[in-house]
Amino acid sequence: MSWDFETDPEFQAKLDWADQFVREEVEPLDLVWPHLVFTPLEGRRRDAIEPLKQQVREQGLWATHLGPELGGQGYGQLKLSLLNEILGRSGWAPVVFGCQAPDTGNAEIIAHYGTPEQKERYLRPLLEGELFSCYSMTEPHAGADPTMFETSAVKDGDEWVINGWKFFSSNARTAAFFIVMVVTNPDVSAYNGMSMFLVPSDTPGIEIVRDVGLGGEPLGEGSHALIHYQDVRVPEDALLGGEGQAFAIAQTRLGGGRIHHAMRTIGLAQRAFDMMCERVLSRETAGGLLADKQFVQGYIADSYAQLMQFRLFVLYTAWSIDKYNDYRRVRKDIAAIKVIMPTVLHDIAQRALQVHGALGVSNEMPFSGMLVGASVMGLADGPTEVHKVTVARQVLRDYSPSDDLWPTQHLPKRLAAAREKLAEYLELEVADL
């Protein structure tokens, strides 16, 4: 049996380069332009960021989630996870490396399901970083439950007409096009009656009613749109992947994306952990360093164990995806990662905030944002509770009920079985043992 926790030297050299590059060249962008990550590049931002993108391309690390035929490197999920752990430290890093969400997932499904014309119109400029996209799925009354979606598309001649409401459509205000998930056949189950459309953002009938922000952001300055689609007409060739294929497309999009998101979360949690360790070795109170206080030592130990357990679980799942090339086979592990992820970031960020005291809750530190982000992760791509149900159902498929009321590991039951086995071996009656 072979087992190895090492990264091959060639790719480790690329990770070392990315680590230094992100720290020295990319992280400063988070301070200078913190709220412009998903705004099309122009002026000084383009002058500053395009050379950084070129350096990434020269290192062979641009859009690594895609295959060589689409300008990527065809790296598997394990290598992508290790890279995303580094990129998670910076808001701008995914843009500079050509793998920002939701564009990565949108690019992946267009690559898998798009026609040649759709790839030329939407995928190529998306991969070049020349435009941004929006995934418009959840609805105000339904949240992330597609079985309750009401936004519909009805065929009218050689066009489809879209009507309905979508909520929390991220980056809609700067997106060049939307991928919209709608009901096209209400007479069958949602799993077979929903479709996706590629809709340019300037199509008549699209109204961004308002942009919703996260906790702590000023009203009106958020990036998650409430959208009203009113008689939005798109041609037949706007259909992505075929009618009724929305669920299959969505699973292609979400499987790998959750792994990448988890590793970026690990990078963010590691940042909070590093800040906490530096703080406890620097701050003195009550006659000694914070590092000497048992409560604080408990924070450090719990955070380290939590972070390492989660990291290894995510890497194991990424390895499994590469080995089996089947997201369905590792579905329960992907769901479990989604369940754990918010708790890991929340717990470590909360401990880091605590050891920083009043400074920790100030807007000069990142912990409040991390805590809000952790709450968002518990809802994004489906609420945590839904994924717990998935984990439980998938786990229980590997078990069978006992043949009577008593568990198979119940001691009297095992003892009786053992006595029968021994009696058979010794050619005796059970009563003679």
Image (spheres, rainbow, N blue to C red):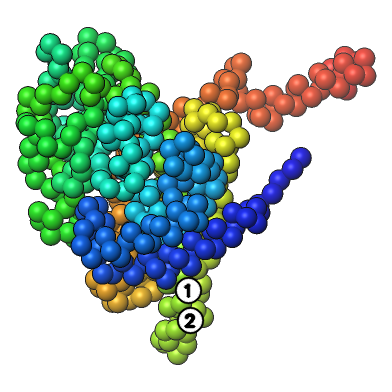
Q: Is 145 rendered above or below residue 258?
A: above
Residue at screen point 45% across, 53% down: 57
Circle 1 — which element? helix
Dot 2 crowding, Cα within 10 Å, few <14, some 14–19, many 20+: few
Tell me the CA gap for discs 2 and 1: 6 Å
| Whether residue 197 is visible | yes
* The quadrant where residue 244 appears: top left
What numbered label is drawn on residue 277? 1
Could you tell me how many numbered marks the image carries?
2
The secondary element bearing badge 2 is classed as helix
Q: Is residue 273 above or below residue 78?
A: below
Discs 2, 1 touching: Cβ within 8 Å:
yes
411 and 316: which one is in front? 316
- Mark seen at residue 364: none
**For residue 239, side relative to residue 75 (left or right):** left
- Dot 1 amino acid type: Cys
The kind of residue on which mark 2 rests is Leu
Q: Residues within 10 Å of mark 1 (few under 14, many from 20)?
A: some
Quadrant of the rendering where the N terminus is positioned: top right
Of the pair 394 and 171, the residue shown nearer to us? 171
Query: Which residue does the image show at 39% across and 74% down from the upper left?
Result: 355
Q: Quadrant of residue 180?
A: top left
Closer to us: 329 or 54: 54
| Vertical position of residue 309 compared to residue 362: above or below | above
Residue sitting farthest toward the bottom: 287
Looking at the image, residue 414 sits to the left or right of residue 287; the answer is right
Q: Position of residue 191 (x, y in %)?
A: 32, 18
Can you identify the residue that label 2 sits on?
281
Q: Quadrant of the C terminus?
A: top right
Rendered residue at 21%/54% (across/down): 39
